[in-house]
Image (cartoon, grey):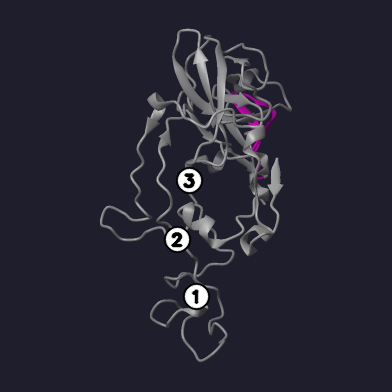
């Protein structure tokens, strides 16, 4: 699904992109499910940058994606498969039997005209959504709830997938795409299949301008800064960093430093940590 380009310019020499014609069925979104995005450029309510390397980019509308899929036992037909500028996976517009339309995450193998359904005892096939307790061992799933009726929280990015390993009491044991094995309440719902656009990781932007179009600003090395701006800054020519332990811009020791909270509530549910 990725395509290369003839090297007619330096930026096209390394560039790879997705061949949308093989997947996308329409170029126009459904207007009733569009919302506006307020661009914050990584700034907080005081206007200070709290997330670096964000800003600029092309204007885009937000697609109201339904992560809960809480219309139970009402069949829906897939009308279109669309590009979403706010995420790296594709989305599908579905039409319910009662006339309502919603956007959902598109799974690999979903096609226009296919019928999907959400419910307790629906068939285990790609696109359907049902509780973890009713999904067979070894099934690939995505858009998984962490608490019942909360909506999908895990496995939503392009190409990601989790596997049902078994049931243990009121919990289902899942193996996530990160390598982590953890317990999730068996009453939680999940969708069958792998999230679409697994080729996304193979894309090479080819030039800096495409990063800027996506709203990604440049990342500068600490050693290229002045002493007032970074612990590695200053010096004549190329200097060693002058400190034993690697540090962040704010002087915090990093490099193998654990950032997860020691008393996080979900620690007891993790059987095996990710690598």
Q: Residue 127 at x, y = what percent?
A: 62, 22
Which residue occupies the foreground of this view, 24 or 219? 24
Can you name the residue that lies furthest to the left here? 46
- Left or right placement of residue 186 versus residue 51 in this view: right
* Magenta-tinted stretch: 159-178
Q: CA distance from mark 3 to mark 2?
A: 29 Å
Q: N-terminal of the two: label 1 or label 3?
A: 1
Which residue occupies the foreground of this view, 223 or 266? 223
Can you name the residue that lies furthest to the bottom here? 236
Structural crowding at the residue carrying mark 3, measured as other residues with C-alpha within 10 Å and reported as few (<14), some (14–19) or many (≥20): few
Q: Secondary structure at mark 1?
A: helix
Q: Is 94 above or below relative to 271?
A: above
- Which residue lies under the disc numbered 3? 264
- Which residue lies under the disc numbered 1? 222
Quadrant location, the N terminus: top right
Q: CA distance from mark 1 to mark 3?
A: 32 Å
Q: Residue 184 at x, y = what percent?
A: 57, 31
Whether label 1 touches label 3, CB < 8 Å? no
Is 204 in the magenta? no
- Left or right placement of residue 232 versus residue 1 in this view: left
- Which residue lies under the disc numbered 2? 53
Is 175 in the magenta? yes
Q: CA distance from mark 1 to mark 2?
A: 14 Å
Task: Please identify, in this view, whether the residue under mark 1 or under mark 3 is nearer the observer.
Answer: 1
Q: N-terminal of the two: label 3 or label 2?
A: 2
Whether label 3 touches label 2, CB < 8 Å? no
Which image quadrant is residue 174 in?
top right
Question: Residue sitting at 35 percent across and 60 percent down?
Answer: 49
Q: N-terminal of the two: label 1 or label 2?
A: 2
Question: Residue sitting at 68 percent across and 60 percent down?
Answer: 13
Q: Secondary structure at mark 2?
A: loop
């Amino acid at each position: 699904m990725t395509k290369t380009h003839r090297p007619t310019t330096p930026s096209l020499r390394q560039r790879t992109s997705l061949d949308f014609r093989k997947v996308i069925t329409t170029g126009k979104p459904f207007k009733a499910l569009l919302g506006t995005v307020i661009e914050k450029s990584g700034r907080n309510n005081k206007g200070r940058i709290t997330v670096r390397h964000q800003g600029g980019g092309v204007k885009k509308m937000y697609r109201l994606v339904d992560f809960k899929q809480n219309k139970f036992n009402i069949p829906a037909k897939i009308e279109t498969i669309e590009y979403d500028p706010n995420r790296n996976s594709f989305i599908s517009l579905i039409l319910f039997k009662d006339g309502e339309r919603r956007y959902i995450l598109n799974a690999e193998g979903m096609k226009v005209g296919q019928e999907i359904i959400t419910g307790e005892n629906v068939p285990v096939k790609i696109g359907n959504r049902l509780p973890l307790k009713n999904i067979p061992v070894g099934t690939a799933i995505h858009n998984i709830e962490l608490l019942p009726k909360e909506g999908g929280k895990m496995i939503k990015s392009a190409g990601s997938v989790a596997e049902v390993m078994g049931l243990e009491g009121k919990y289902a044991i899942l193996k996530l795409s990160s390598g982590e094995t953890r317990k999730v309440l068996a009453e939680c719902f999940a969708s069958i299949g792998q999230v679409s656009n697994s080729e996304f990781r193979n894309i090479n932007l080819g030039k800096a301008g495409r990063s800027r179009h996506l709203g990604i600003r440049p990342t500068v090395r600490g050693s290229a800064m002045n002493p007032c701006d970074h612990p590695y800054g200053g010096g004549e020519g190329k200097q060693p960093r002058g400190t034993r332990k690697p540090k962040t811009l704010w002087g915090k020791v990093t490099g193998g430093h654990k950032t997860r909270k020691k008393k996080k509530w979900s620690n007891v549910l993790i059987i095996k940590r990710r690598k």
